Image (cartoon, rainbow, N blue to C red):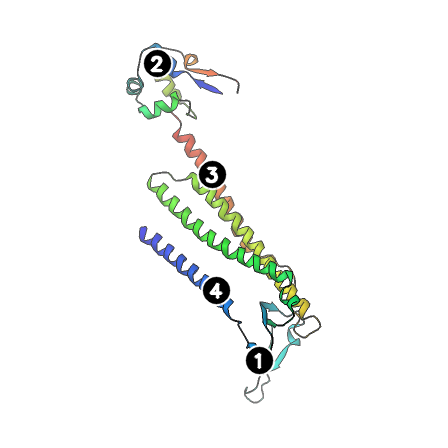
Amino acid sequence: MIVVNLDVMMARRKMSLTELAERVDLTPANLSILKTGKARAVRFSTLDRICRELDCQPADLLEYREN
Amino acid sequence: MRTLYGLFGGIMLVCLGLFFAHIFYAEEEPLVGNLTAFNSRYAFTVTDLRSSAPLYAVEQPIEGVPEGISAHAHVNRFDVDCYTDDELVGSDPRLHWATALQLFGVVALAAIVVLVLAALIVFYRSAKQGRVFPRKCVALLTVIGAMLVLLSFSVDTQTYLERRLAHDLLAGTQWVPQARYTIHFTRIFFGLTIIFLSQIIRIGREMQDEQELTV
């Protein structure tokens, strides 16, 4: 399964959910879906914006773990 | 839209009321005949029997037709009322099973009506919220379809048991009826179609979730 470590990166960059949502042009509810791991899919454009704002790589956000 | 739903619900309730009223009224007295005339207790009635003899074997000449014309009435479908003091006949297991299946049929039909109304309400509310494929409808429609299939088999079995009983009672007479187990595929097909529809809604729901949960 794919684990989203968005909360870890947000804590490192000391950025709140609302602030990040505003910067990447998403609603806080939508970003929360990603943060809590409920998202079914992520668009590349969204991933691109998040990585740009958090100054990180996709691998910092997404991790694969065995079930 | 609310008016349509109200009208639909009202018609369904009236039909249900008439259906139950007919059942309770029919149970109070025999359909044909008089207790004192037959000097026996009313046992049961079997309806919509078909003659197993050739159609023209049970016939009656029609009088009063114009001169030069000969006409005969042929019996194809008939009902049988049984009057007896013999408790073995009145308490035949097939009769009890047929009664139980009839009761199940009534309950199942009432449940189907309620479930259909519930499904329509769920659809309406869900559509108002912008959700086209409501999750609750999948389960409701699956249950409705399954109950329709069960109801079909129940009605067919009840009919067969009654016809079998009548066949055994009237064996050797001119009125011996057919006693074949007939499956009404129309009802089964309708039930299976509703189950199929519920699966389509389930797939649609998954696609909708996929789209909504794509960030």
| Residue A5 vertical position relative to residue B196 in the rendered view, above or below | above
Task: Say which label, 4 or 1, has the lower sequence index.
Answer: 4
> Alpha-carbon distance for marks 2 and 1?
94 Å
Marks 4/1 same chain: yes
| Residue B83 vertical position relative to residue A26 in the rendered view, above or below | below
> Which residue sits furthest right?
B172
> Alpha-carbon distance for marks 2 and 3?
36 Å
Residue marked by disc 4: B24
Q: Amino acid at mark 1?
A: Ala
> Alpha-carbon distance for marks 4 and 1?
24 Å
Task: Say which label, 1 or 3, has the lower sequence index.
Answer: 1
Residue B157 vs residue A55: left or right?
A: right
Marks 2/1 same chain: no
Q: Amino acid at mark 4?
A: Phe
Tell me whether circle 3 and circle 4 mark residues in contact (CB < 8 Å).
no
Q: Which mark is residue B108?
A: none
Q: Which mark is residue A10?
A: 2
Residue closer to the observer: A62 or B156: B156
Residue B119 screen position, x and y as percent: 42, 46
**Chain containing mark 3:** B
Helix, strand or loop under label 1: helix
> Which residue sits furthest bottom?
B67
Q: Amino acid at mark 2?
A: Met
> Alpha-carbon distance for marks 2 and 4?
70 Å
Q: How many marks?
A: 4
> Alpha-carbon distance for marks 1 and 3?
61 Å
- Crowd tier of the residue under label 4, counting other residues whose Cα lies within 10 Å: few below 14, some 14–19, many 20 or above: few
- For the point 57% across and 86% down, which residue is it? B63
- For the point 50% across and 54% down, which residue is it? B107
